[in-house]
Amino acid sequence: MEISSQARLVLFLVFLVAFAVLEARFPRRDLTLDRARRWISNLGIVVISTILVRVLIPFAPAGTAFWAQSSGIGLFNIFGISPLIAGLLSFLVLDATIYWQHRLFHQVPILWRVHRMHHTDVDIDVTSGLRFHPIEIILSSLLKMAIVALLGAPVAAVVVFEVVLNGTALFNHARLGIPAPVDRVLRTFVVTPDMHRVHHSIHPDETDSNFGFNLPWWDRLFGTYTAQPRDGHDSMMLGLPYFRGDASVGLVTLLAQPFLSPDGARGAAKQSGDSDN
């Protein structure tokens, strides 16, 4: 398991550097805030989250899979499903779980308070794919562990899913310009930067769409797919109507996000602050 963790770290760093280089070489949009300050905060968040998860949940999803396999626990182990079929089904179920988790974090007020930190980033780039509050990371890890135990998911499938999810989160948040014809083909199989950028629109109806991180099929299947932003990718405003400027950057402010009250509502049509979504 230690080797698996080291390999995942190496792949994570490779993805991070590769997409950072690509978005600098082929940028989709101009930045509006100082990149250094944003990167310090966004990278700081992932370091804090990683340490907390290691301390509070030492086994994590891959460790849970190993325990379930060695104990014969979980549906796939009980019914003797072949490793290949079990692996494919585990990947799909875990990805669908992340999709529904994401929707839930938008719909339940207390969960939205935790998740909204991710949406206060007004310049979406590769580091935005790391900008999730430690509380959200811990809750997500616990949910994935429960699903892995229920399924009896193979260890290899869980490791592959975690690696792919990390890589695609960095990819679809990257400030990377992909030609439209290529993007149309890619988003058939994976969530692209243009597809996911819609989710970071300042318009609430667009924010509540394109919830997928990895596979793009769930949004189409469950009616939450928006092809393009109404204002266009170059002109669209990103982030939330509140927590902008300095309030969207500082590391301490980001960590305190769930406990702060915004000055205004989430959108023009929602005037009750965070009591709605």
Image: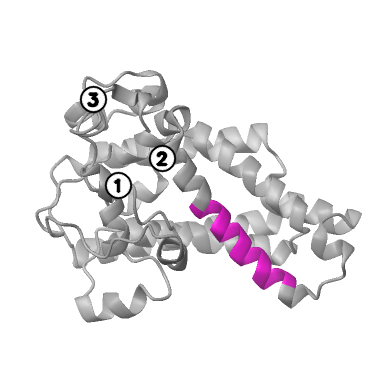
Q: Quadrant of residue 221?
A: bottom left
Q: What colour scheme governs how the chains and residues are painted in the rendered image of this protein? A: one colour
Kind of residue sitting beneath label 3: Gln
Query: In this view, which residue lies farthest toward the left?
Result: 235
Q: Earlier in the sequence, mark 2 or mark 1?
A: 2
Which label lies toward us, 3 or 2? 3
Q: Residue at x 28, y 22 (%)?
A: 272
Cα distance between the residues tagged 2 and 1: 9 Å
Circle 2: element type: helix
- Magenta stretch: give its range: 86-99
Q: Which residue is mark 2?
A: 106
Q: Position of residue 106 (x, y in %)?
A: 41, 40
Q: Residues at badges 3 and 2 in contact (C-beta under 8 Å)?
A: no
Give the number of the disc on residue 62. none
Task: Categorize mark 2 by other alpha carbons within 10 Å: few (<14), some (14-19), many (20+).
Answer: many
Residue 97, magenta (yes or no): yes
Q: Residue at x 47, y 32 (%)?
A: 111
Q: Quadrant of residue 154?
A: bottom right
User: Which is the main secondary structure of the residues drawn in magenta?
Assistant: helix
| Residue 187 makes an appearance in the image | yes
Q: Which residue is mark 3?
A: 271
Cα distance between the residues tagged 1 and 3: 17 Å
